[in-house]
Image (spheres, rainbow, N blue to C red):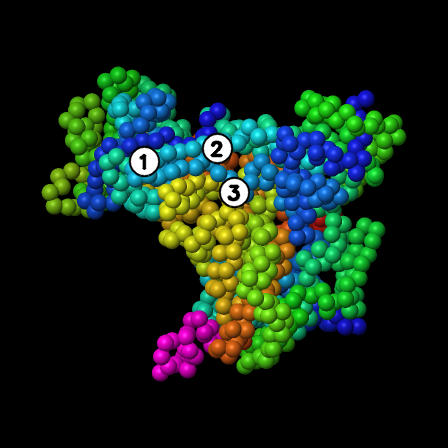
Amino acid sequence: MPNPYIPYLTKVKSIVTENKVNDIKTIELEFKKEEDYQKFNYIPGQFAEISLIGKGECPIGIASSPTEEGTIKFTIKKMGTVTSGFHNCEEGDIVGVRGPCGNGWPVEEMKGKNIVVIGGGFAFSTLRSLVIYILDEKNRKDYGDITVIYGNRDPGEVLYQDVLEEWKKRDDIKVVLTIDREAEGWTEEVGFVAPIVKKVAPSSDNAIAVICGPPIMIKTTIAVMEELNWKDEQILNSLEMRMKCGIGKCGRCNIGNKFVCVDGPVFSLAELKKMPNEY
Amino acid sequence: MGIEEDNIEIISSIRENAKKLLSEDQVDLVIGYSEGTVPLSSTPVIIRKAEDVDKLTWNNLCYMNLARYLAPLMPQLCDREGNALRIGIVAKGCVARAINLLAVEKQVDLKKITMIGFNCNGIVNRSKIDLEIGEKEILEVVVSGDDIIVKGRDWEKKFPYDQYINELCKVCKVKTPSTTEENCIGECKELESIHDEFSDIDDFEAKSAEEKWDYIKNILEVCTLCYSCRQACPACYCNLCFVDQNKPIWFGKTTEYRDIFTFHLIRATHLAGRCVACGACASVCPVGIDLNFITRKLEKIVKERFDYTSGLDAETLPPMMDFDMKDAQEFMLEED
Amino acid sequence: MDQKILKKDQIGKLYNEFAGEYDFYAPIKEKGNIVFEKIENPEDIVLDYLNSKVPPKSVLFPQEEVLFEYTLDEKNVEITDRQNLDQKILIFGVRPCDAYSFELMANFFSFHGDWEDEIYLKKKENSTIIGIGCNTPRSTCFCTSVGGNPFKKGDMDIFLTDLGDKYLVEAISDKGKEMVQKLTWLSDASKNDLKKAEELAKKAEELIVTKIDVDTVVKNLETNFEHPVWDEISESCIGCGSCAYLCPTCTCFDVIDETDHYNNRGRRIRIWDTCQSCLYTLETSGHNPRDTKIQRCRNRIMHKFSYYPTNYDLLGCVGCGRCVAVCPANNDLRVILNKIKNIEKKEDEKVVA
């Protein structure tokens, strides 16, 4: 048994700024040892504990899809000391990675179903991983229709614009982008995510919805989904909690008897309703 | 005679006053002390009905400073919207001092608080008794006459009361709440200042710097950094304590001596001019550390330089939060 | 014969026999408190004690522990793993409740199989536990209510019974049997010795006066998460964490990097933490899922008596009573459990103390 607290060492390959106010960056990491990369088998929806050795560690969802080979990507918002440290990284800096942690999106159970992906703001990173995974030519035929509804405060906050453009060009995925209020030059939908979901009205027939975003967005969107006859087992959420070890040992991230870092972060709405409201 | 009789009177007065406040709807609840379930302890309790006043007691083991529950105001003392209820609080002298301090620092609204005052006759020194009894289980502690009687399964030991109370209680000058009758039912006595020789720390002061260092290290080494002292202290109410800050990280969190020492040093400095000498920190420490000689030393410095004693009224700002042109400044290079 | 006698003046001899090969831990008295420390001088060992202040979990799961060390050199980072997990450890003079706590911790640290805590598990594998029965349990002990017993032998390798002037030595596990065989100088136990030990065991069980209906507590906790009883239960709590630090089964920890910038080196360590701390669940965004004292107090009780049984089919409490003895606000766990037990009933029951 190797010491589970020792991270793989990776090198920063590139850092890309994702939004206009420059507080969200996507960092691309290359494993120093090939064998470590081979051991790091992840599925969309999982996260990793990434660290600046000497500064600290934080749990970040994996933004890249396993189908994007060679490197892994993380989208990080500048909020505290460690995340600010990541923002100041340069190419070639060393970053520790532990993982992959968590249960991830249930990509096997989702096969054969229509997928509705609903994201708000900065929480879109693991949804990017999921959609790219599904759209990959090896996987696309295993899934039904895909609808992506992605809302943001304003056009400057929309992440992964290059990837979104690619998706819009395809005919096997429907992409609906929306922003909170009218803005100059914006030709797509305007409105909060929940009313746009109501407008799009995705069918609950043989479908699974994946919702990620700020708590208020999740709450309002779920209310709309229930109106559209979606059942609790069909709606999946990815939760956030304060974490330290990421592997179910330090006890910090428990909600009731479940640990968000091993039993989650993905929970269905049915499961969430059985858990205490402490998240 | 003596302590035991005093206690009977105190209990009766606390219960009578609490009953009056509750039955006349002058307060929504009363927070006081109840009989502990293990020897050498007492449990803080909230009562909301006049018929429950018999739960309140006083037994020289009521070491918790109840003002600690006022800031941050615990949810049980608030209404549904989070506004403070009208609170009656059983107040020995140091609890009143703490309430005054919190009022000056704008952490409590004195208009919502009614103190139930009495003349405190001291708190038994738990760790001193534990140390003397050693590894025998104490099953009961009673104050009888002027003695503390400690009983085990098949043994009994007597301790003279005035030698086995907390060191701070031995030199206490504010046994009765120092406040106006407006804020208090029962005993109270407004004090403008106190006279204190601080002779209890003469021994400590006489030590050389090296001796002081070793003396403090000897006491502090066993600390487990559980932060009970901080949690029990009414003056430690910061939303983000320096312990938890990470910009910058003030000290490491291990139990290596340098980390332990830094914690206690910084906390003592934050309490200079504010500590109300209740001794709760020493009483709650699970490993029996008593650092009150340091708080006494700080109190002496503050008294000498600023002629100030904390918690005597609800208006005067503590010296670390205020300045006066007459403050001594001999440490400046040039006299004005 | 399997049962041997160790005379009280032979403890030094026992120590000398094993101190070379093992890290020998036993209770000592440090400034009035009984704690488990590594023994340099066998005269320091104290076995005539009620129970230690800090539980022996501090031997295998210390308050601060290095996870790994690192050196930082410009853009280069080197990580060094821990070296000494193969060192044999002997923990001497452990009470049955604490011996059981080692098993509970091993269960917890090996759960979620993908990620086992190798550090604790390896140390546990290399440990030998020599325990001692409790002739006089404290009035705060309630091990019999949670499946324990003052003379429970199963979680130890060797079990000692204090017969007054000597100890009865019983080897329980294979590891224990091997160890006892090495101590060829131990005399055999007589029939009288065995009889006396049995009598002591029976008397000890009778001395445990605190009885708690834990089954009803566990059942009531399944459905009463929002019950107003929690307001009352958390009233006097000051949120210090003494209960968690001194609890043999509390294992929550924090992870921090300590860097010596002048020498470009550092270590990542874990330190004890407690869910009673108000910032325990605070997220960087400012959202705090458990920002009231009521939620935090409730979480600890639920963890021991509801989440543990749900996840592992075991209780998370060994009944040692340390939290009861040490709580600064005298928020007595026995009173709390009784209040929970009585949720469906209306009367007020007093705890038998």
Residue denoted by label 3:
C64
Circle 2: element type:
loop
**Residue B220 location, x and y as percent?**
58, 55
For the question of whether residue C75 can be seen, the reply is: yes
> Which amino acid does the dot numbered 2 rest on?
Arg
Residue pictured at 44% horizontal, 56% vertical: B242
For the question of whether residue B52 can be seen, the reply is: no
Residue A181 is left or right of residue A213, and the answer is left
Please state the chain letter of the residue tagged with numbered disc 2 in the rendered image: C
Answer yes or no: are tags 2 and 1 on the same subunit. yes
Circle 3: element type:
strand
**Residue B89 location, x and y as percent?**
58, 67
Residue C205 is left or right of residue C347, and the answer is right
Q: In this view, does B199 lie above or below C215?
A: below
Residue denoted by label 2:
C82
Give me the disc on residue C76: 1
Please state the chain letter of the residue tagged with numbered disc 1 in the rendered image: C
For marks 3 and 2 on the same chain, the one whose residue lies earlier in the sequence: 3
Which of the image's four quarters has the C terminus of chain B?
A: bottom left
For marks 3 and 1 on the same chain, the one whose residue lies earlier in the sequence: 3
- Are the residues at dot 3 and dot 2 in contact (C-beta closer than 8 Å)? no
Which residues, given as a range, are shown in magenta?
A: B313-336
Which of the image's four quarters has the N terminus of chain B?
A: bottom right
Q: Which quarter of the picture shows residue A53?
A: top left
